[in-house]
Amino acid sequence: MESSIIPPERTEVYYGQEDAMKILLQAMANVKKEAVVCSDANSPAFSMGVEPVKKGFIDFKKRGVKIRQIVEITKDNLEYCKEFMNYVELRHMDNVKGNMAVSETEYVATAVLEGAVPVTQTIYSNVKAFLEQQRYFFENLWSKAIPAEQKIREIEEGIEPTYTIVLDSPEEILGRIRKRMQNSTELMVCAGVGGLEFVYRNLLDEYRQAFKMQKEGKHKGIRWIIPVNGENLALVKLFVNEGLQIRHIKDMPPLNFAIDGKVLHATIESMEGGKMTGNFLISSEPPYLYYFKSIFEELWKQGMDVQDRILELEKGIEPANVEIISNPKESIKRAWDLIRSAKQDVMVMLSSPTAFRRQLAMGGLEVIQQAVKNGAKVKLLIPSDRDVAQTLCQVKSALPQAEFRAMDASLTTSITIVLVDRKECMFFELKDDSATDSRRAVGLALYSDSKSIVSSYISILDAIWKQSELNEQIRQANEKLEDAYRQLEEHEKVQKEFINIAAHELRTPVQPLLGISELLQQSMDGKDKAEITKDELEMLVRNAKRLERLSSDILEVSRIESKSLTLNKERVNLNEKIRNVIKDVKSFIPNNKHVEIVFDSKATSPTVVEADKSRLFGVLSNILKNAIKFTDEGTIRITLEERDGQAIVCVRDTGRGIDPEIFPKLFAKFVTKSEQGTGLGLYLSKGFIEAHGGGIWAENNKDRKGATFTFTLPLTQHN
């Protein structure tokens, strides 16, 4: 009976080139099914450049052994990595240090690799517990590493990868900050005195170099936002004399951050006394950069020039007033007096619909009328309920000079805000909304003439005002959509199919609209200040426009079918129009698609047609977006030629082609194989092209790679 001999567990270090290489190659030969490897940037050159090691990897492939390896891929080892990928499943990770491999039964680690040179020291172990530990360590890294193909593509295309990391090592944090400073061309900092003391202790030379480069026109300079007071005045003056641009704000955001244009550094710690923080976020993600840069620029606009602040401190000038008023009777009287005295504008946001009705019952309308008589522009934001619309109609008829907006109910807060002449503001706490008298309904009130507070709330109310306008546009768009539905019910038997498609399209933009409204409500609850970002407003606008586009498409269908379509024709340079559309749709190519759009015009001079610009743009855009949607990689080629008095435009892609199931009815309504869209695009395109006296058709390519869409338009006769 044959007995298996289990080797004793051991851990040894082998020195010298001969012994170190021998144990390494033996461990490679012992691998049965799988091994995992973690190595530095020199490993690919060692693995492919040292012949015995390369033969070991060739042997792995012949025996079907699976090798997973993590390595730092760089410009210098790129070609080695490409060759290496023939033998291993390779992933990339930044700053990998050391070289180790774990098989089913053995562990080896080598000394620092120096490229295609044999090693002189190898650590060997077959201790089972150690092997399990190292494999667990590898799996954690493997889950965070990125595919080698992605990293190679980034290097070859010059793409800088985005990242977000949190560091807790003071040495590493300082090193990264110092390196970014040396490579920066601008810097924006929002930090308290602790941050300024940190720079004075650790980065003064780098800052002075930036100031020198700014004088030479090689740097945009360093801007810093900080609360300037008597305690940090001396340090502020020192940096101002060095060349630092500083603005004072009274109320700092609850974190310190710096942006150099490409990277964000941020911490919530105060860095008191200039001490290095133990927790630091570093990110090159564009949303982070855009968000924090927007915050900085808004604070910079609101901030006071440091020289003015220094003058205030040196002359003992009192700061802006902030006053808490606990007597509701006095606070309401104060607010009404402010409104009556307004000369330029009044902005009011009521806490609830009931608060609006209480103010009217107490004579608030007469107060507003006095402000209007003074020449002030009046804007009121009122949360909506069932009865607000009727009340607003009555108020508007009595006071047509004022502007009113009904807010979405989700924006209802427990605060009433009054802003007068963009100089003074008051805030009222809602204590009991069921009370019939405002003096019983109101709790604490706050008055301030602080520029920063007033400007912040002006931004908030302006944002809510704009959002309310968007909500009205959405409501009108929905009304148009409902009208279009009714028309389609009269003319189409496919009503149910259309409703299902349209409902899906509507949910997509409506959800972010509701989500951002809820976010705005949450951000205002229980806080002194809140902001809505430009990104969020743009999302509201974008989704509102999406709703309007859907409505517009349906109305265009109605016009085509009722033969009431009217074209606004003008001379159009078709070459230029195609280039403009290409430029527009390129932004719709997802990052995970490798698609190139090429325009090939065979005409020797501009191709001119008489056409409706907007509808022609829609046809080209729809065909190109469809090509992008159904093409994962390859080329979308657009050709333009003139033949027999016609301009002929062909769009050929290398995608999946036209599904045989929908090919016969490709240009009919509601025909689509996509999970998104209403299936109206090609139907409208056909209607528009035929209205111009042209034709449109499609076919699958003969090589079975993609499809080609072609349309013609009559050429303009030259005089």
Image: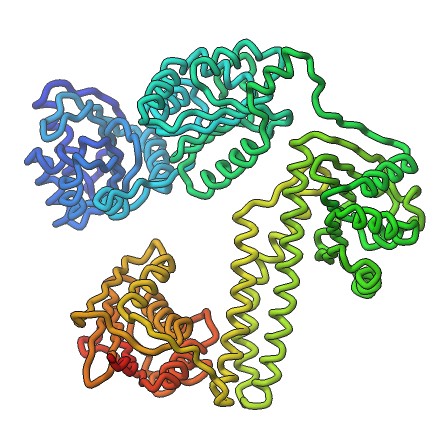
Comparing 270 with 18, the one in front is: 270
Q: Is residue 332 left or right of residue 98?
A: right
Quadrant of the rendering where the N terminus is positioned: top left
| x and y percentages locating residue 594 in the rendered image | 28, 57
As drawn, 94 above or below 414: above
- Give the residue displayed 33% in from the left and 32% down from the top: 134
Q: Is residue 119 left or right of residue 662?
A: left
Comparing 245 with 160, the one in front is: 245
Residue 637 in view, yes or no? yes
- Give the residue displayed 57% in from the left and 12% down from the top: 233
As drawn, 643 above or below 349: below
| x and y percentages locating residue 573 in the rendered image | 29, 70
Q: Quadrant of residue 166?
A: top left
| x and y percentages locating residue 361 in the rendered image | 92, 53
Q: Quadrant of residue 122?
A: top left
- Give the residue displayed 57% in from the left and 72% down from the top: 503
Label tally: 0
As drawn, 136 above or below 585: above
Residue lying at the far front in this picture: please name it: 719
Residue 386 in view, yes or no? no
Q: Quadrant of residue 510?
A: bottom right
| x and y percentages locating residue 557 in the rendered image | 49, 82
